[in-house]
């Protein structure tokens, strides 16, 4: 009986090791070729925790088999800093040769889906207080329409230059506010991405604000997610959610290859791509993007990097990626209930 129990644990162990290794291969396997690898990338961190738990079980049984999961974790050890960081810098003093940027999926400034007390106006007022405290040079917003009150409020704070696109059902509106004059603006011929060129202290910088395809999960899908977490979901509900994830993963590959990568390749000045990627650090698009751009969370982050705290599982899906010509001096996320996302604030060193 004891041998049979250990054999069952070994089978489970090998299963979770295989899933862990596959979940970290999304960057090498395009979703349009094999979408299931991209689907598994969402589960990388939970699978990592499962393998840690199995290691503890083997250690309690005084078995060498703990090395199976330990080896798998060691093979993908480079992924750990994408989810948890120590010793980063939260803030530095602002200077003329620094550029401070904030990105935020505002969710209409209406709070969490379950929060019925916050209105668009009250949420905007709370965000204005954040801006007063942070005083960034550039503000990149997603899921935020260019309302008259919002524009006037931001202009009074010194953000006299703004540009945005209206968005669609799948791609939210994006807006860029800046204290510095725009040298150029472009909506990238799509509904959820735009970029502007600014100059500070003689250094030109291109700021791109994006909101990649969302999964468009409705209330019915949220109910099924809750059921799945309790192993009670019906097959139709599960297939419906999986179908949406598969389609969105494929869309993200197209957005990267047809829109973002060409923009990066043709840009001759330092570039910052800010926004809601709707994908985790183990995903195809993040792994491809960080081959040519740097992630300030990896450089200066501290603690868990979760940026989404809504009804779905918590993930780091909001980013401020930048070209190597810029240096990240600090990275900080601001915990707030204005939205189901947290704002991210990064200060960059402008190198002439």
Image (cartoon, rainbow, N blue to C red):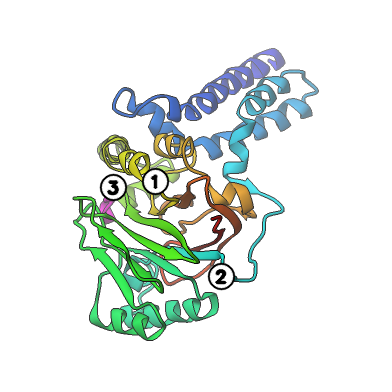
Eyeballing the image, is 3 above or below 278?
above
Please give the name of the residue rendered at 53% of the width and 54% of the height, measured from the top-left corner.
Answer: 306
**What distance separates the C-alpha of mark 2 from that of mark 1?**
22 Å
Quick check: is 5 in the magenta stretch?
no
Q: Nearer the viewer, residue 203 or 89?
A: 203
Question: Magenta region, mostly helix, strand or loop?
Answer: loop
- Residue sitting at the far bottom: 156
Q: Is residue 53 left or right of residue 29?
A: right
| Residue, disc 1 | 268
Q: Is residue 42 left or right of residue 183?
A: right
What distance separates the C-alpha of mark 3 from that of mark 2?
36 Å
Give the residues drawn in magenta, as a range. 216-220
The furthest residue to the right? 62
Q: Is tag 2's residue or tag 1's residue first in the polypeptide sequence?
A: 2
Residue 119 percent across, percent down from the top left = 33, 79
Residue for badge 2: 96
Nearest-to-viewer mark from 3 and 2: 2
Q: Residue at x 37, y 47 (%)?
A: 225
Name the residue tied to disc 3. Answer: 213
Find numbered disc 2 in the image and state the secondary structure of the residue it sits on. Answer: loop
* Sequence-first disc among 1 and 3: 3
Q: Is label 1 or label 3 in front?
A: 1
Disc assigned to residue 169: none
**What residue appears at the point 55 percent right and 34 percent down from the top-left corner?**
47
Residue 140 is at least partly visible in this image: yes
């Amino acid at each position: 009986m004891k041998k049979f129990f250990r054999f069952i644990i070994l089978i489970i162990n090998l299963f979770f090791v295989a899933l862990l290794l596959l979940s970290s291969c999304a960057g090498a396997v395009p979703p349009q070729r094999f979408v299931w690898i991209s689907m598994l990338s969402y589960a990388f961190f939970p699978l990592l925790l499962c393998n840690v738990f199995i290691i503890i079980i083997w250690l309690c049984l005084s078995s060498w088999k703990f090395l199976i999961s330990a080896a798998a974790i060691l093979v993908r050890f480079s992924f750990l800093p994408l989810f948890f960081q120590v010793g980063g810098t939260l803030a530095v003093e602002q200077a003329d040769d620094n550029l401070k940027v904030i990105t935020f999926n505002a969710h209409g400034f209406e709070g969490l889906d379950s929060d019925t007390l916050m209105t668009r106006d009250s949420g905007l007022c709370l965000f204005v207080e954040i801006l007063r405290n942070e005083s960034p040079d550039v503000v990149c917003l997603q899921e935020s329409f260019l309302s008259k009150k919002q524009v006037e409020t931001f202009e009074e704070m010194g953000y006299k230059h703004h540009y945005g696109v209206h968005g669609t059902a799948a791609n939210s509106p994006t807006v860029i506010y800046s204290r510095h004059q725009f040298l150029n603006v472009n909506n990238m011929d799509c509904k959820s991405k735009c970029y502007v060129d600014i100059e500070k202290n003689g250094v030109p910088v291109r700021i791109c604000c994006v909101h990649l395809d969302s999964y468009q999960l409705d209330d019915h899908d949220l109910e099924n997610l809750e059921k799945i977490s309790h192993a009670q979901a019906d097959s139709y509900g599960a297939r419906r959610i999986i179908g949406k994830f598969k389609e969105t993963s494929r869309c993200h590959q197209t957005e990267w290859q047809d829109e973002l990568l060409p923009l990066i390749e043709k840009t001759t000045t330092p570039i910052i791509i800010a926004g809601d990627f709707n994908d985790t650090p183990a995903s195809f698009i993040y792994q491809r993007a960080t081959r040519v751009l740097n992630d300030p969370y990896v450089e200066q982050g501290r603690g868990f990097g979760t940026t989404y705290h809504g009804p779905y599982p918590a993930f780091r899906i909001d980013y401020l990626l930048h070209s190597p010509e810029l240096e990240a001096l600090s990275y900080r996320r601001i915990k707030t209930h204005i939205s189901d996302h947290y704002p991210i604030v990064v200060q960059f060193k402008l190198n002439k």
